[in-house]
Amino acid sequence: MTASTHAADTVSERTAVLSVNPVVLPAPGRAVDLHVRVSAPVTGSDLPVILLSHGHGPSNNLSSLNGYAPLANYWAAHGFVVIQPTHLSSRTLRLDPNTPGAPLYWRSRAEDMKRILDRLDVIETAIPQLRGRLDPSKVTVAGHSMGGHTASLLLGARLTDPHDGTEVDLAEPRIKAGVLLAAPGRGGDALTEFAAENYPFFLTTDFSQMTTPALVVAGDKDPSAHLTVRGAAWHTDPYVLAPGPKSLLTLFDAEHGLGGVSGYDVAETTDENPERVATVQRLTRAYLRTELYPGDPAWHEARELLAAGPNPLGRVESK
């Protein structure tokens, strides 16, 4: 363990984690009921919440409530209640490809998060060890890849529904801050022909009204060549094109997996790097902590620690 890693880990002590799944939320009108995993520290009260939206990768289980353990476990061990839905885009559901909203279910994904917030009381009732311990006034959202798109909509990004031409506003005022991990950028001429034809909702993505505070995390070696002609810079659009307050964490030599945030030792992580994952864990936790509790030094300390080493793994800028 390096000295910097040790110092970062002592910012707040870890605690044991309770993880329960599936908690089933009835969802009339949805193709199936909504299943969620809930991870929480075994002690503490007035706990803040992170809604974690999975991506749309090639694995059978990572893109579901079973994925993203490196993030969910870390955040829960450091004082957050993490709630992970299985979106309709998950391979685990094996839905008919003709199901309305297929294949990525962009609108349903955001609606899943709103449904969770509407039913926090049901979630608490389903988990006796959690009853009365949540703070519903301190809710955040995080998402990786397609999950980052979901999170951006909840934070205020807009798009035009390609089916009826209406502007879509899914901003969720109960969400106080967010983290976008390798999230999609703007549409228009930034997209490849493949993306424009297969995912037309990407064409009109507009970050100009994404006013909720957010940390954007992007790898500088993440070209996403099947989606964009702009290269890795595309994933910084939610920072560049949205109004402040925003921060950008650029990870050096990181690809789309950001070192392996979607799961432990997964084959689809092309840039596996435990130290990079640890950086994402620490910086995201610190950012959300300070956004929810103004005056908390966690974000300032984490930024200083990132820059202090002789070979920093990334850089942070803010506006």
Image: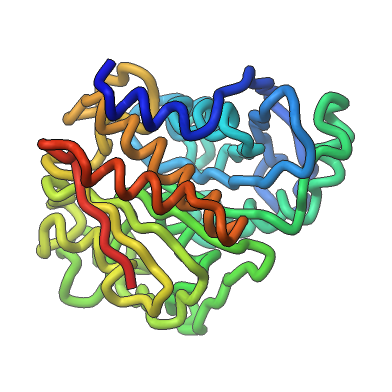
**Residue at x 72%, y 22% (from the top left corner):** 42
**Residue at x 76%, y 48% (from the top left corner):** 27
Quarter-wise, where is residue 173 in the image?
bottom right
Quarter-wise, where is residue 174 in the image?
bottom right
Q: Is residue 278 above or below residue 167?
A: above
Color scheme of the displayed model: rainbow
Q: Is residue 209 above or below residue 146?
A: below
Q: Is 152 on the left-hand or right-hand side of 312?
A: right
Front in this rendered view, residue 165 or 1: 1
Q: In x, y percent, where is residue 137?
A: 74, 58
Q: Is 38 on the left-hand or right-hand side of 226?
A: right
**Residue at x 30%, y 41% (from the top left corner):** 305
Q: Is residue 176 above or below residue 217?
A: below
Is residue 239 visible in the rendered image? The answer is yes
Quarter that holds the C terminus:
bottom left
**Residue at x 48%, y 26% (from the top left corner):** 69
Is residue 104 visible in the rendered image? The answer is no
Quarter that holds the N terminus:
top left
Q: In x, y percent, where is residue 119?
A: 80, 49
Front in this rendered view, residue 295 or 61: 295
Q: In x, y percent, where is residue 24?
A: 76, 34
The tally of labels here is 0
Q: In x, y percent, where is residue 209?
A: 45, 81
Front in this rendered view, residue 170 or 290: 290
Q: Is 286 on the left-hand or right-hand side of 228?
A: right
